[in-house]
Structures are given as C-alpha cells and as structure tokens.
Image (spheres, rainbow, N blue to C red):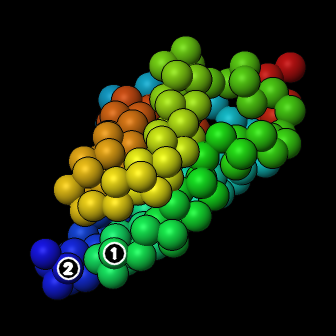
C-alpha cells in the first residue's frame, strides 16, 4: 500500500493539468459558471488553490510514510485558520452561493482530517476523508471557472 501511494501521489495533479483548457476556443465553449474576479482577486483565489494542491501532495507523501503528525500539520495549514487571512475587497460578492458553501466546507474538511488522523492514524480512514475533501475541489472546478475582468467593469 505504501509503495502504491508513493508511485501514484502525483496522479491527481497530472490529471488536472491535462484536463485544463488550453485555447481561447476551449474557454469560449466552457459551460461552467464564470466567477468574475479582478486580477488581484483572481491571483488570491488561485494562490489558495495552489496551496491546497501543495498541501494535498504533502499529505499523500506523509500518509505513504504513515507520518500522522505531518499529515495533521499539513491538513491544519489548509483548515479554518487559513481561511481567516485578509482576502482582497469584494471577494464575497463575487462568489456564488454554492462557492461560498464549498470553500468553508473544504477548510473545515482539512481540520476534520487533522483530528481524525491524530485519533485513528490509519491509511483507509485518512484516504476516505481526504477523498471527501477533494470531492469539494472536483465539484467546484466542474461547476465554476474564474473569469478575470477589469475592476472598472464592476462600476
């Protein structure tokens, strides 16, 4: 099991990169709901998502080594405490109701994963919970896309 996890830890990253639209024609045909953000907001959101990916990758490596302390630390780093930083102005108004549900649920899911691995410390339980956290990411990316707009267009 440990060897399987080590060999396959980057599979979700590779799949996400290969599935990303690569042309303007693909973006024009993209049926997902646009979330209109100015450049600062878009960079902030993308930074949060990059952090999630780094945390997920680190968690996979730590689980393969059954290093539950590191799993818990990484999970907490993407939990509710990470959601309390200062986002750019106007972020809440830009998001759909669904987005506003998935974001906090994802942060809470990381905190719950941290608590679970501290108590249980077993790979099947951790993977099951991690799959639930990742489902929020998959669902959100299936429904939404970021559309960067000029901030003056909002006026």
Label 2, residues with CA under 10 Å away: few <14, some 14-19, many ≥20: few
Q: Residue at x 32, y 40 (%)?
A: 132
Residue bearing the label numbered 2: 2
Residue bearing the label numbered 1: 66
Q: Could you say where residue 35 lies in the image, as x and y percent from the top left?
A: 57, 30
Q: How many marks?
A: 2
Q: Residue at x 26, y 51 (%)?
A: 125
**Residue toward you, 38 or 139:** 139
- Proximity of marks 2 and 1: CB atoms separated by less than 8 Å: yes
Label 2, label 1: how many angstroms apart (C-alpha)?
8 Å
Mark 1 residue element: loop
Q: Could you say where residue 152 lies in the image, as x and y percent from the top left?
A: 85, 31
Quadrant, the C terminus: top right
* 43 to 13, vertically: above or below: above
Q: Residue at x 27, y 61 (%)?
A: 122
Q: Could you say where residue 2 lies in the image, as x and y percent from the top left?
A: 20, 79
Q: Quadrant of residue 7?
A: bottom left
**On the picture, is 102 further left or further right than 117?**
right
Q: Nearer the viewer, mark 2 or mark 1?
A: 1
Q: Residue furthest top?
A: 97
Mark 2 residue element: helix
* 51 to 88, vertically: above or below: below
Q: Quadrant of residue 143?
A: top left
């Amino acid at each position: 099991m440990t060897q399987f996890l080590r060999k396959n830890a980057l599979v979700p990253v590779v799949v996400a990169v290969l599935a990303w639209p690569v042309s303007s024609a693909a973006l024009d045909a993209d049926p997902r709901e646009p979330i209109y953000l100015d450049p600062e907001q878009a960079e902030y959101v993308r930074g949060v998502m990059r952090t999630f990916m780094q945390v997920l990758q680190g968690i996979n490596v730590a689980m393969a080594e059954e290093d539950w302390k590191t799993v818990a630390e990484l999970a907490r780093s993407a939990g509710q405490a990470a959601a309390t930083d200062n986002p750019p102005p106007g972020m809440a108004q830009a998001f759909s109701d669904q987005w506003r549900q998935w974001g906090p649920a994802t942060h809470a899911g990381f905190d719950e994963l941290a608590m679970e691995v501290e108590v249980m410390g077993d790979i099947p339980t951790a993977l099951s919970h991690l799959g639930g956290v990742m489902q929020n990411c998959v669902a959100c990316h299936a429904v939404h896309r970021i559309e960067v707009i000029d901030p003056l267009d909002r006026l």
